[in-house]
Image (cartoon, grey):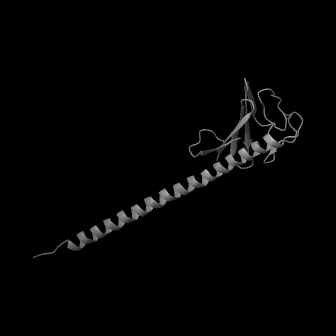
Amino acid sequence: MKKNGFTIFFATLITSLALAIGLSIYDLTVRELNLSATANQSQYAIYAADTGAECALYWDTQCEASGCNAGSAFATSTESTVPVAGAGLLCNGQDIVAAPWSVTQADYDATTTITINFSPQPYCAIVTIAKTGTPARTTIISHGYNTCAAGGVTRVERALQVSY
């Protein structure tokens, strides 16, 4: 009885098994690294959203600059005066009045939208402050982004909502 080739067959079998295990470990490692990077970017987005919401909360309740409506920097259903740039309404060192700012009003409703960029970092937040009804009920929705470049494949958005 001849046993020619058994050693080569056995070596090929062991090599194939080792290669399959190695590729599986490599695949798991790559997936874990991608998940870790996404979680990191998600953290930047939620921090941007939180900063935007806190800034809006502060200026909605503490505004003393000229053009503020009864302590608020944001429009109500009866007042739509936008504070002047340079009035001291700062978020993260940025004058939020000079940033993109829009106001829409309807019967007993007003919505103000501001954009806050966190230079030199690429993060930003788009914050909507809605005042509805009488007495006014305020809802702040802050969308934070890990990058301000719209349409990026790695762009992550997180949102926070505050109502009072």
Query: Which of the image's four quarters has the N terminus?
Result: bottom left
Q: Between residues 65 and 25, which one lies in front from this camera angle? A: 65
Q: Between residues 11 and 111, which one lies in front from this camera angle? A: 111
Write down the quadrant of residue 14 in the picture.
Answer: bottom left
Q: Farthest bottom residue? A: 1
What residue do we see at 69% from left, 44% from top?
124
Residue 64 can be seen in this image:
yes
Residue 122 can be seen in this image:
no
Write down the quadrant of residue 157 in the picture.
Answer: top right
Q: How far across and how far down the image is residue 41, in percent? A: 61, 52
Q: How far across and how far down the image is residue 93, in percent? A: 81, 47
Does 53 sit left or right of 26 as displayed? right
Query: Which of the image's four quarters has the C terminus?
Result: top right
Q: How far across and how far down the image is residue 151, in percent? A: 59, 39
What residue do we see at 60% from left, 51% from top?
42
Q: Between residues 84 and 36, which one lies in front from this camera angle? A: 84
Height in image: 115 above or below 108? below
Q: Farthest front residue? A: 135
Q: Farthest left residue? A: 1
Height in image: 67 above or below 40? above
Q: Between residues 164 and 117, which one lies in front from this camera angle? A: 164
Q: How far across and how far down the image is residue 20, in percent? A: 35, 63
